[in-house]
Image (cartoon, rainbow, N blue to C red):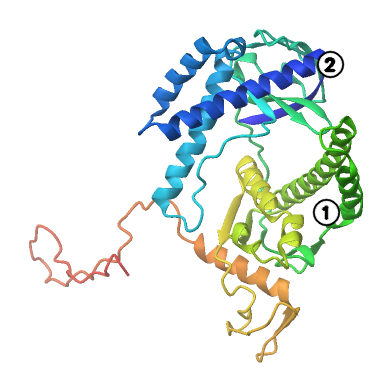
């Protein structure tokens, strides 16, 4: 499944109709969530039946396409199922109890309620009055059959309205092997340092734009609540946040694609970002770096291009010496690894080498076995000319649990 995004151009009344469709989708989701909270063991089928009841009870819900209402029910059930799944896994801390949506920004249609007129125009056929919209973008929708488009989303952002097409295609890129492996150690000083000693600088997009963000935030706080000027100031603040998030996303995407194209195996740390940001001294810098997005794109391009990506346990990767294996204690302020064996490396490069070695040890024996992998005992010797149905073998074998 790939997602192609276009900016839509329409009239003011069409934008108001999109807002009404988004509010209706939010209303259906919140009503289904309330029905689940008040009921006992409500299933997904019962939520679908409750959605039918809402369509007969409220005329503005009936005006929205039935498949769009079903998509709202599915969103509600997805949050419920995720909550139960976290409870079964006994995840420590909060389990993600479903919450009501206050400011939804999107409405999702399935295979009905819309019609693609040509690669640059789409028309929504429900009774919300959205009508015909122009698509602005460089993607070529004519390349994909229309029956491959499984979902269409209308999304409201700070700089306008967008239309996203979810297309069911399997995108694969065949690349020649590079015979290269690499380990990556992400950090705050440098975005990442690899096992070859190369590093990528950390752009710190949020730190660079923080001055302008504070300026726009002050403008918002000075405006009267509920006024038109306050809404305009909020929109300018939202545009600045959107620009920073796009910069961070494009930076991580570009780096991940280059790393995957240049190596057959990429190893990285299996970091728990949610736990790391609990440190209030480093939370802003960690969120600004975008480690989660970088890992997400590494794994995406790894599947797309047929490369191997391995997430390893990060424990003691910075402390262990790559030369002798000794554990060298060091604080975060110590940036150079110095061992008694004579090994002297940059702290992050030493960690990257350990990450790569750990990944190579993890991926050593994969696949299926044509024979029993357990070592069998030696065959016993027999006299020449002895007639036996089979060779007498030793019963001493290696334990399958060793």
Furthest-bottom residue in view?
340
Which residue occupies 64% across, 14% down? 146
User: What is the crowding at mark 1: few (fewer than 14 residues within 10 Å), some, or many (at least 20)?
Assistant: many
Marks 2 and 1: CB-CB under 8 Å?
no
Question: At which x and y percent is residue 57?
Answer: 51, 12
Residue 87 visible to an observer of this rendering: yes
- Tell me the SS state at disc 2: helix
Q: CA distance from mark 2 to mark 1?
A: 33 Å
Which residue matches tag 1?
Answer: 206
Q: 192 or 369, which lies in front?
A: 192
Q: Is residue 87 above or below residue 335?
A: above
Q: Quadrant of residue 200?
A: bottom right
Q: Is residue 284 left or right of residue 264?
A: right
Question: At which x and y percent is residue 173?
Answer: 66, 37
Query: On the rendered image, what quadrant is the N terminus found in?
Result: top right
| Disc number for residue 12 | 2
Question: At which x and y percent is residue 59?
Answer: 58, 10
Q: 314 or 287, which lies in front?
A: 287
Q: 289 or 46, which lies in front?
A: 46
Q: Earlier in the sequence, mark 2 or mark 1?
A: 2
User: What is the crowding at mark 2: few (fewer than 14 residues within 10 Å), some, or many (at least 20)?
Assistant: few
Which residue occupies 48% across, 41% down? 82
Q: Is residue 75 above or below residue 348?
A: above
Mark in the foreground, 2 or 1: 2
Query: On the rendered image, what quadrant is the C terminus found in?
Result: bottom left
- Tell me the SS state at disc 1: helix
Which residue occupies 60% across, 43% down? 303
């Amino acid at each position: 499944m790939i997602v192609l995004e276009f900016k839509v151009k329409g009239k003011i009344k069409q934008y108001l109709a999109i807002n009404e469709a988004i509010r209706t989708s939010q209303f259906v989701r919140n009503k289904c969530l309330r029905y689940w909270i008040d009921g006992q063991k409500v299933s997904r089928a019962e939520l679908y039946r409750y959605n039918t009841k809402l369509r007969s009870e409220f005329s503005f819900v009936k005006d929205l396409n039935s498949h769009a209402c079903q998509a709202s029910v599915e969103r509600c059930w997805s949050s419920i199922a995720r909550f139960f799944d976290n409870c079964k896994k006994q995840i420590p801390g909060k389990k993600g109890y479903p919450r009501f949506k206050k400011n939804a920004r999107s409405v999702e249609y399935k295979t009905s309620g819309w019609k693609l007129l040509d690669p640059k125009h789409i028309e929504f056929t429900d009774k919300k009055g959205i009508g015909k919209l122009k698509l602005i973008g460089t993607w070529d929708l004519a390349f994909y059959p229309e029956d491959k488009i499984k979902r269409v989303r209308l999304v409201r952002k700070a700089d306008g309205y967008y239309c996203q097409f979810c297309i069911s295609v399997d995108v694969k890129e065949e690349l020649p092997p590079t015979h290269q492996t690499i380990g990556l150690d992400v950090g705050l000083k440098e975005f990442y340092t690899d096992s070859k000693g190369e590093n990528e600088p950390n752009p710190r997009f949020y730190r660079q734009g923080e001055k302008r963000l504070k300026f726009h935030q002050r403008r918002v706080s000075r405006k009267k609540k509920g006024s038109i000027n306050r809404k305009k100031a909020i929109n300018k603040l939202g545009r600045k946040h959107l620009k920073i998030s796009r910069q961070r996303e494009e930076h991580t995407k570009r780096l991940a694609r280059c790393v995957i194209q240049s190596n057959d195996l990429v190893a990285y740390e299996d970091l728990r970002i949610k736990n790391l940001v609990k440190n209030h001294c480093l939370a802003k810098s960690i969120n600004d770096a975008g480690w989660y997005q970088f890992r997400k794109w590494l794994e995406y391009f790894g599947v797309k291009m047929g490369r191997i990506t391995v997430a390893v346990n990060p424990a003691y990767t910075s402390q262990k010496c790559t030369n002798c294996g000794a554990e060298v204690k060091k604080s975060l302020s110590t940036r150079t690894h110095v061992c008694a064996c004579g090994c002297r490396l940059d702290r992050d490069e030493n960690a990257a080498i350990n990450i790569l070695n750990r990944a190579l040890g993890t991926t050593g024996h994969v696949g299926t076995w044509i024979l029993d992998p357990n070592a069998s005992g030696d065959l016993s010797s027999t006299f020449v000319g002895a007639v036996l149905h089979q060779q007498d073998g030793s019963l001493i074998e290696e334990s399958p649990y060793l």
